[in-house]
Amino acid sequence: MNGKGAHAALLLFFLLAYLLPLGARDLVLPDETRYAEIPREMIASGDWIVPRLNGLRYFEKPVLGYWVHAASQLVFGENNFAVRLPSALAVGLSALLIYGLARRVSRRKGADGDATAVLAALVFLSAFEVFGVGNTAVLDNLFSFFLTACLTAFYFASEAPPKTAKESGFLLLAGLFCGLAFLTKGFLAFAVPVLSLAPYLVWQRRYGDLLRMSWLPILTAVVVALPWSIAIHLKEPDFWRFFFWHEHIRRFAAQNAQHKESFWFFFVLAPAMFIPWTFVLPAAASGIKERLFQRETQSRLLRFCLCWLIGPFLFLSLSNGKLLTYILPCFPPFAILTAFGLFQALAKNKSNRWFQGGLVVGALVFGLILVAFLYVQLFGFNGLHPYQQSWKALMVVNGLSFFILLCFWALKSREGKNKIFIFGMAPLLLFFLVHFTIPDQTIEAKSPGRLLERHVYAVFNSPILISDENSISAVCWYLRRSDVYLLEGAGELNYGLTYKDAGRKLLDMKSAAKLIQGNPGKTVIMARGKNIARWRNQLSQPVFQDQSGPSGYVLWKY
């Protein structure tokens, strides 16, 4: 494939997998509705300093991610596309940085350097973890983009002549993006660059640069973060105590940390997260080993990316609290290393046995997935079928078959660059179709939007809304309300309820029953079906009820 064709295919991949279908599916609880509702409340209240959910203080993250999502809603409206757009754009911009970083050190005669850069961006975009998170409204994509920009700028600074304006300019950029990362997710914005850059400078024996190149980006990051940091302290003096101890120290070291997992959690799940490139990692590793000590410029980039990949990965593995999204900043260096490694491996031998074997393994694995899917869809598993609509099942079959066919096409191709690029395009159809083929059980259990939208006008005039901790962000978002009562448990809103001005938004069963009896015809309850089942005998019977399904959500109107 020529240079223009490869660039066009890369752009097509991003548009079809990430951008165009963003509004095709409902928002998913709890993350997407949370990161839709907090920015909406900022816009509605005009308070751009203090994050709030259901009118309650929500101090689990700094403010920049909410600002970006609010800007998207102001431009594109309060809809699914606008809510997810910042995540998708962050992935696209990260891919652009990866392309620029790889292209910078691959300027050779011919198109090889450009092909390596295109492949590096494609490796990133086609990784299953990047795709899964990149189509979801969470802050991790934006955070990862800022860190990628920070580390890219620092690498360019390290390649510039020392003590020059060019070096200082890149260091200022590194500090700027580090500060933006801090305003997105907090102190981890400093940990990831330090754990990446310090080992690299030591490896390069640039010991003096550890301090010389640090003060300017640190100072810049502090200047960027300081205005809002002071503003939130003046308005909410308890923010930094709660945010630092609860969201950092407790999550990292506490025995009862949220999302607690073992040290090996990321190691065990990494092969699935890096699919499809997991299948050809032996070939990439052999190429990296050869290239690591070849051309000086390229070897420095590979060393830089190894430090960028390994340091944060080990650090995040040490944390007691873990989610798969946490290691997203490790994917840009992985993409660059994989691209350079595969090009090196296939440059020497276009029929590299490790690469060819990886293609066969990939085809076999997805062939088994296809067979298992067909069996479950046709015969069921414990009485469950993934899809009631046959067209959805057919689309999944097409996506899996496309992956298998491209594996065999890459296997038969005689040109090394084409082999790698064809394999990288294998997930495209599957990625595109996923937006339209979410399993019925998942929609029922995680997306109450359709249920709420069916009754939005009937609920609009009901002054009293009651929900549970699982559904609260969806109720607020779809009904455009921030005055919803919580029944029994507060969950992540527990901290906000400790303030006197929070009112009595948390109800016990006795208080809820009394509230309903005192407001006939004015109360609506929307909660998970399993919670409604527990409450049924303790509350009066509603005059109307609807549900999203047996394992979904129930709406009661009194």
Image (cartoon, grey):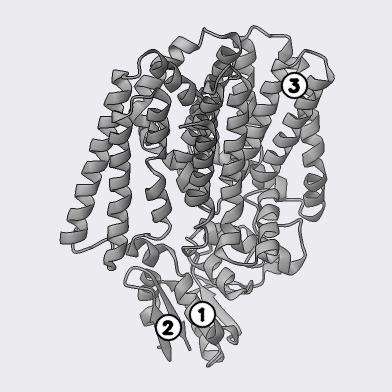
Assess disc 1: are there few (<14), some (14-19) or many (≥20) residues with their C-alpha within 10 Å of its C-alpha.
some
Q: CA distance from mark 3 to mark 2?
A: 62 Å
Q: Secondary structure at mark 2?
A: loop
Where is residue 147, by image quadrant? top right
Reading the image, the residue beneath label 1 is 512
Q: Which residue appears at 56% of the width and 90% of the height?
A: 519
Evaluate whether residue 327 shows in this view.
no
- x%, y% of residue 540? 42, 87
In the rendered structure, which disc, 1 or 2, sits on the residue that comes first in sequence?
A: 1
Q: CA distance from mark 1 to mark 2?
A: 8 Å
User: Of the residues shown, which amino acid type is indicated by label 1?
Assistant: Ala
Reading the image, the residue beneath label 3 is 214
Evaluate whether residue 70 shows in this view.
yes
Reading the image, the residue beneath label 2 is 539
Of tags 3 and 1, the one toward the viewer is 3
User: Of the residues shown, which amino acid type is indicated by label 3?
Assistant: Ser
Front one among 362 and 9: 9
Residue 80 vertical placement versus 504 (above, below): above
Q: Secondary structure at mark 3?
A: loop
Q: Is residue 96 left or right of residue 382?
A: right
Location of the N terminus by quadrant is top left
Q: Which mark is residue 546?
A: none
Where is residue 415, by image quadrant? top left
Residue 161 vertical placement versus 543 (above, below): above
User: Of the residues shown, which amino acid type is indicated by label 2?
Assistant: Leu
- x%, y% of residue 401? 28, 47
Residue 386 vertical placement versus 506 (above, below): above
